[in-house]
């Protein structure tokens, strides 16, 4: 029987070149939703982008040939469920695209910093009001940037911020040093950094340890001129605490790209919170994504076919990464 690879429809443009380079494999598209097809339950590999929970759960439950799932995502939290955990315990391998979105997300973070430092919200308002307003900008050089999460995204943000002349502090589980950071502290010491932080960047995965790690106590410890930028996961920041901090002036502003509920409902209070820039989980979207995702998949496919260690493999399912 030919070895079969399921490819999410978002990655369909890659199928022709993959089929040409790997003639011994059969590549088939799996739509985002719809009825289950027999060949879904025979595939050995799933290259998974957007896919309905129902299809994924049925593949996990019924496809005993499935050996490896590669996600077109930087984190595993959105697919973690009992069915996947059970399959992982029985040898299924799960990997993520650990570097495909680093560049666009890091550029989004720097753009968010400039957006506030250069007073673009005030300038846009002035233009619409036809007012010749000239606010004094802040300088990113000399600022302190604290990044929660020192993985590949955090490191991409770190070197860019350092290039702008910022002091860059990091937070991870154990305080392990990371490239591009002036100092890294364990998560338990996060609050010691907040009083000196100008830009607090959330770039951590969602786990039981990071869920709601930023709340009222953390906002109270921050400068009232500080800016929060969340490109991690919505549940890392307590939504109500963020709203209260912005309304009370405990912090100056926030750029939030991720939310506990997505899409964010049109009636949600966050749309109207002052000094909050809401973006629709778009920090990762960029013209080079498909190329980078295919490159990461190809590298891992080569490793898989040779029986080698896969890049980006889930290390600790109990922690969610």
Image (cartoon, rainbow, N blue to C red):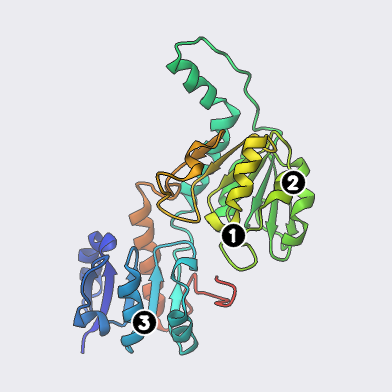
The residue that mark 3 highlights is 60
- Residue farthest to the right? 192
> Which quadrant is the C terminus positioned in?
bottom right
Q: Position of residue 176 (x, y in %)?
A: 72, 63
| Position in image of residue 300 (x %, y %) | 41, 72
Label 3 residue SS: helix
> Toward the viewer: 69 or 269?
269
- Which residue: 47% across, 22% down? 124
Res 71 label: none
Q: Residues within 10 Å of mark 3 (few under 14, many from 20)?
A: some
Q: Nearer the viewer, residue 311 or 72?
A: 72
Q: What distance separates the C-alpha of mark 3 from that of mark 2?
A: 43 Å
Work out how far the residue at label 1 is from the one at label 3, CA to CA, in angstroms.
29 Å
Toward the front, the furthest residue is 267
Q: Residue at x 57, y 26 (%)?
A: 118
Marks 1 and 2, the one that precedes in the sequence: 1
What label sits on residue 194 in the rendered view? 2
Q: Residues within 10 Å of mark 2 (few under 14, many from 20)?
A: many
Q: Which residue position is annotated with label 1?
A: 151
Left or right? Give the position of 312 relative to 221: left
Q: Residue at x 47, y 59 (%)?
A: 99
Q: Is residue 162 visible?
A: no
Element on which disc 1 rests: loop
């Amino acid at each position: 029987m030919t070895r079969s690879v399921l490819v999410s429809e978002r990655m369909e443009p890659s199928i022709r070149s993959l089929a040409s380079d790997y003639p011994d494999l059969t590549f088939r598209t799996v739509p985002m939703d719809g009825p289950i097809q027999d060949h879904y339950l025979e595939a050995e590999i799933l290259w998974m982008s957007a896919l309905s929970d129902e299809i994924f759960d049925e593949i996990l439950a019924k496809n005993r040939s499935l050996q490896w799932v590669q996600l077109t995502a930087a984190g595993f939290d959105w697919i973690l469920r009992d069915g996947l955990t059970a399959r992982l315990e029985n040898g299924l391998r799960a990997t993520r695209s650990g570097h495909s979105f680093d560049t666009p997300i890091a550029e989004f973070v720097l753009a968010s910093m400039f957006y506030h430092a250069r007073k673009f919200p005030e300038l846009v308002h002035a233009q619409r009001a036809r007012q010749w307003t000239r606010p004094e900008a802040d300088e990113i050089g000399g600022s302190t940037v604290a990044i929660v999460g020192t993985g590949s995204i955090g490191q991409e943000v770190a070197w860019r911020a350092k290039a702008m002349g910022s002091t860059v502090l990091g937070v991870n589980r154990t305080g392990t040093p990371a490239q591009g950071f002036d100092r890294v502290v364990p998560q338990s010491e996060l609050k010691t950094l907040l009083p000196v932080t100008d830009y607090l960047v959330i770039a951590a995965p969602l786990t039981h340890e990071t869920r709601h790690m930023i709340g009222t106590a953390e906002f109270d410890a921050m400068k009232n001129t500080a800016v929060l930028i969340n490109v991690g996961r919505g549940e890392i920041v307590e939504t109500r605490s963020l709203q209260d901090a912005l309304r009370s002036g405990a912090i100056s502003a926030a750029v939030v790209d991720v939310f506990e509920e997505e899409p964010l409902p049109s009636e949600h209070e966050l749309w109207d919170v002052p000094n909050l820039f809401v973006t629709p989980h778009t920090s990762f979207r960029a013209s080079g994504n498909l190329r980078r995702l295919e490159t990461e998949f190809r590298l891992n496919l080569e490793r898989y076919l040779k029986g080698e260690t896969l890049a980006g493999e889930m290390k600790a399912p109990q922690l969610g990464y």
